[in-house]
Image (cartoon, grey):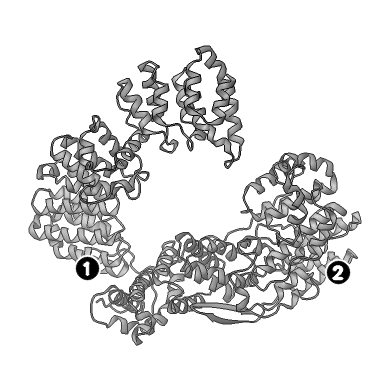
Amino acid sequence: MGAVLEAVRAGRVGETALLVGKLADGERRALLPELQALRKELRAAPWESGSQRSYPALQVAGAMCHSGAAAAATWIAGADMRWRQAPADMLLKVLADRDTGWQADVARRLAARPVSADVPFLLMAGLVRRSGCEVPVTDAYVVGWVRHIGHSWGRVPLVDRLRAEPDLAPLVNGLFELSDLGEVRWLFGDGPGSWQSALAELTGAGVLERKAVVDACVARLLRGGGPTDHRIFLPLLGLLALTRDEVCERVADWTALARDAVSPVAAHAQSVLGALALDGDLTARQLAEASEGLLFRAEKKLVRAQLVLLGKVLARDPSSAAELLPAVAQAFGHEDTQVQERALKLVERHAKRLDGEAASQSDVAVAVEQLSPALRVRAAAVLGIAPAAEFAVYEEVLPPVPEPIRLTAAPDSAVELAEEVSALLAADGDMDVAAFERALDGLARHAHRDQDALREALEPVAATRWWWEPESHRRQHSEEYFGHTRRGLLTTEGGLELILATLYGAVSTATLLAGLRGGPADHDCARHGFSRVLDVRLRELALRIRTDPQPLLLATPSWSTGTLEPAELVDRLDTYRRLGARPGEVDFAQALLRVRLADTTAALAAAGRASELGTPEGERLARRLSAGEATLPGSDRRTSGPRILIESDEVQELGTQFPEAFRRLGRPFTASDAVRHCYHWGQENHRHWLATLPELRELVAVRLVHDLSESALDDQRGAAAVLPLLAESGGAAGESTHLCVAYGLGARHPEDRLAAVDALLVLAARGQLDAERLGADLGQLVRRGAVKPLRLAESARTAAATGANATIWEMLRNTLPVLLADLATGGTAGASGATRGLGELLSVAADCAERSGARGELPHLSGAAARRGSSRLVVQARRLRDALAVAAAVREGQEPVLR
């Protein structure tokens, strides 16, 4: 057996098969443990090592030695065998002596593997052919067959290759049942010579049963699949050229497709149903059922086409009004008021046909309540019904003000603390502020209490780190790694690594001291100040753990927002006084910036207690608490291309009385500081920025403006995730905060826009939203091309849908005049793309005005409404004008004038 292992290690497949073939059954079973041990050894070997050549021979040897079909299939299809497999004909050759039942079992088990296992199709097909079993119609087998047929290049046309397949029918049926065609989508192609044309030709020639193929194709479209699968099956359905009888017997399928399928498939089903309806092959009830589903779809093109079809049928057969008009009324609930108006016009045209049809009249009357207010009045007049409380007092609906969460105390058990540290390190840098601060405080407390117990609890965590093994070559570089020479500023993850390495002696005291005192050169970018503050906090804690452990951290927040209760900070300073401990300079500075000043009564009470401590830190805290909330620095605006950026003046409170690392946050911030590329690009964590200055959010926001502008201009993803937290933070919400929200509302990615909507609503609920300022900012950003109007319209519509109609109207009331003025003078908003977007903005504004009862004049609106044509922009401008006029007229006791 030593010769077999030698041949396997050398990768000699033929020799391995010959040697194993000479072994008796018992010898093969005895060889298996050694093969398994070799497999384990190869798994641990580096990919670039020469041992990878052993896998094909190892696969052959294991397949020959396993007597059970399940074990043999598992060995052959192992994940580690996937990249270096033995040739399929070799595996078929060495398994030829097994009985047919065993080979059939192996074939079925291999075919049951996922497609990603990449089992060779020739191996599965060879086992199926040799054993005579039925073809296993699984995803892996069918995908393998498609690949095999598609890769069989040559002069033989695809249709002839398929015609020669003995198991064509079950395999084609399996093709329709594949969960996703993504693996082989590119093989299908289009036009003559494609799979679709070949299958259609074979169906027409009778090679494939026509009814089975048509049923399978329609069923696959009904079931759906991958996002592009319809590009294969929908053209195939067209090539099959269904007869009138085949179409008529599948009316229920077309109805379901029109209601639920992806847009191209729904459009096809709609056209089929439309042809049947116009030819008289569809009853009014069937058309109504199909329309009810279609009119709920978001695609305006499909909805408009269905309304046109219903109009044609009603004109041809007025007696169908009782069946069709309730279906038409389903469009009253569509978000697009132009669709609502189209549906209402259809109802108006045929309303008299409902006389005597009480049930249909009732259905339409109920649907009227979904119309916009202006259209609702019009519908009520036509149908002879009383509008329900048409102009009742509007009530704005805003979300409840988010309540900050109280942080729980650090774990009292070192084992529990170790579990939390392990979870944070596994978070891959995306650390929650509260959990991170709890862990830091816990490490400080337990290091002061009993470092030996702390090291024992943390050992399972530390043992997984790269610097743990003494013989590792990386251990030699831990001094440099944790210094500033190569790594720069510490991140949250790097800081925890440093503290662990300090506890286990993997970094020297000299390195810790040099990192705290020295640090990298200052850098004029938005991120350096916050990154350096986090860096020195972590380095100070690590140094104190080594030289003078602290009983606790002063700066640990009381609340999830990062704020610290004044009374708690006084209690912590009192603990330091009683124990004779020395507060950390950086730790105390961070605590001062986190202490909550908004509650003047609590701050003054704590100031008195702090003065009584008789310590320098107590006196400094007392002065801080007595001074009240910090005043915002002056600011100015600068433009950079399409961007609008903010510059701020110096913050006197962060001057010489704070450590050097904190002074950077108080320096004047210029537009040039917001450069994109710097050496700590990608290290920022905006949540920790807000926790650094929880009562001074404008100082954070001014540094976020450039990053948020990239979410709108450069399609960056994720920057706007901080906006809800910014809205929940403390301090005044000034122009930087509002400009950040403005950029977020125009972000490229929907999740970023949704985060901006959340921030807008939170600010409104807290009474901190300046809608006039936000609207004016948005007007300028759209005008400069920094925010696309269609994206802004989607964000505004989303916010209004929560019930904040008055808030969004107030915002858009200050956005639209800038764009309408440009439209009138042929400026930026007059470009075709912006014009289309302006129509959407006007639509949202009209919705909000109608629902909130807004009134008054909007500058330049009358000019847009007076333009010729029926474009969306003109129609929505007229609608907004009329909505404002209706609200004003009703409040003044006049008769509403509708146009």
Q: Is residue 856 visible?
A: no
Pick whichever of labels 2 and 1 is earlier in the sequence.
1
In this rendering, is residue 125 above or below 555?
above
- Asked whether, in this view, residue 70 is left or right of residue 192, the answer is right
- Residue 369 in percent (x, y) is at 30, 61
User: What's the residue type where badge 1 is placed?
Assistant: Ala
Q: Nearer the viewer, mark 2 or mark 1?
A: 2
- Rendering quarter of residue 380: bottom left
In this rendering, is residue 576 above or below 469?
below
Q: Which residue is mark 2?
A: 619
Q: Quadrant of the N terminus?
A: top right
Residue toward you, 599 or 770: 770
In this rendering, is residue 244 above or below 854?
above
Q: Which residue is mark 1?
A: 381
**Secondary structure of residue under mark 2:** helix
User: What's the residue type where badge 2 is placed?
Assistant: Glu
- Asked whether, in this view, residue 718 is left or right of residue 293, the answer is right
- Asked whether, in this view, residue 411 is left or right of residue 773, the answer is right
Q: Residue at x 58, y 70 (%)?
A: 676
Q: Which mark is residue 272?
A: none
- Residue 286 in percent (x, y) is at 17, 47
Residue toward you, 149 or 699: 149
- Residue extending farthest bottom: 825
- Rendering quarter of residue 564: bottom right
In this rendering, is residue 660 above or below 194?
below
- Residue 801 in percent (x, y) is at 41, 62
Kindly indicate whether the residue at mark 1 contacts the one at mark 2 (C-beta within 8 angstroms): no
- Residue 62 in percent (x, y) is at 50, 24
* CA distance for labels 2 and 1: 75 Å
- Rendering quarter of residue 70: top left
